[in-house]
Amino acid sequence: MSDRTLESRGHLNIVKKYYLAGGDLYFQAGNGLFKVHRYFFDRESTKFQEMLSRPPPTGQSVYGSLNNPIVLDVSSEDFQSLLWVFYNPMYSYEEAKLEDWAIILNLACRFKFPEVKKLAIRHLEKIDLELVERISLYQECSADEDVLIPLYAQLCARDRTLSLVETHKLGYETAVMVFQAREHLRSPSDRGKSPLPDDVEEGEVEDTIRDLMKDLFIGSDHRCGIRRSISGDKYDTQRTQNTKSSQDFKTRPPSRRAGWTEPEDGDDYGSFHSSDWEE
């Protein structure tokens, strides 16, 4: 089947920017069709390494081929943001904005690109964000605990307690942990509001947080970061521009075409049977 036939029959739009000569791996994201190099996905992502090594179901073409592209449950625009990391023609990442790095971090976490995840966090650290906004964003993207714990420590060390709005942004599990850590580190008579005692060191604050995280989240999968538990949409996050007014943004959950086969065993991808390209 030719590229033109696949596009017309599947109501897909070839994304010319990322439909590359020499590409050997096909993706569908939203209504976009991509042809990129398998090398990056084999090298960088444990998730795709495992998926691409599996034999396809009987009667189906190889995963990632033209007749059986890998279908991602993300929008075409968001997937282009991730691909930009590998195919950036300027050899510089400075042009990316907060919302770009948030999308990249989210997808790097979902698809297990550890080095891309580190890259996104490094650039997000350069952007001026209010502390709770930063924690909320990192939690949403499942940032590692070694990134989150120092930020939690800053919350515990500040004089004022969490506000109602901040509690909602962080989620009740994180808020409870912060309140308990503040209470543990301060005198009960101070009601958690006074500055930390002079003899409390930064390492002690972080150790307290680690202990509380183990107690509060035992039996839950929070090893790669604590998920926000109040938000009803896992794709929601909040954007605060550099020292300017904040405004909401949302990474867009794509609509699914008829014929989508739900991913199994926690995978974030699925496939179409060959007959599903028929109208």
Image: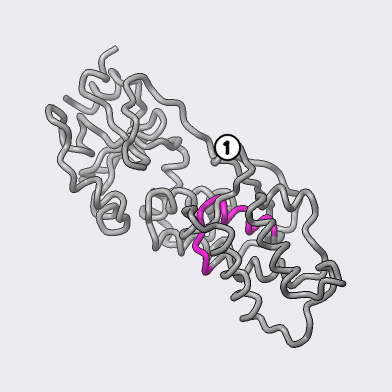
Foreground pick, 165 / 86: 165
Residue located beneath label 1 in the image: 233
Q: Name, please, the residue furthest toward the left.
A: 59
Q: On the picture, is 151 further left or further right than 279? A: right
Q: Name, please, the residue furthest toward the bottom.
A: 199
Helix, strand or loop for disc 1: loop
Which picture quadrant has residue 266?
A: top left
- Quick check: 39 above or below 146? above
**Is residue 144 inside the magenta stretch?**
yes
Q: Name, please, the residue furthest toward the top.
A: 279
- Quick check: 127 above or below 202? above
Q: On the picture, is 178 further left or further right than 256? A: right
What residue sits 54% from the left and 63% below the top?
123
What residue sits 46% from the left and 63% below the top?
119
**Is residue 32 inside the magenta stretch?**
no
- Label 1 amino acid? Asp
Query: Which percent across, then down, holds residue 144?
Result: 49, 63
Query: Which percent across, then down, holds residue 208?
Result: 63, 73
What residue sits 77% from the left and 70% below the top?
158
Q: Which residues are magenta?
A: 132-146
Quadrant where the N terminus sits is: top left
What residue sits 28% from the left and 18% below the top?
9
Q: On the picture, is 203 further left or further right than 194? A: left
Foreground pick, 107 / 77: 107
Query: Which percent across, then down, holds residue 4?
Result: 25, 24
Which picture quadrant has residue 75?
A: top left
Query: Which percent across, then down, holds residue 56?
Result: 17, 36
Q: Name, please, the residue furthest toward the right.
A: 189
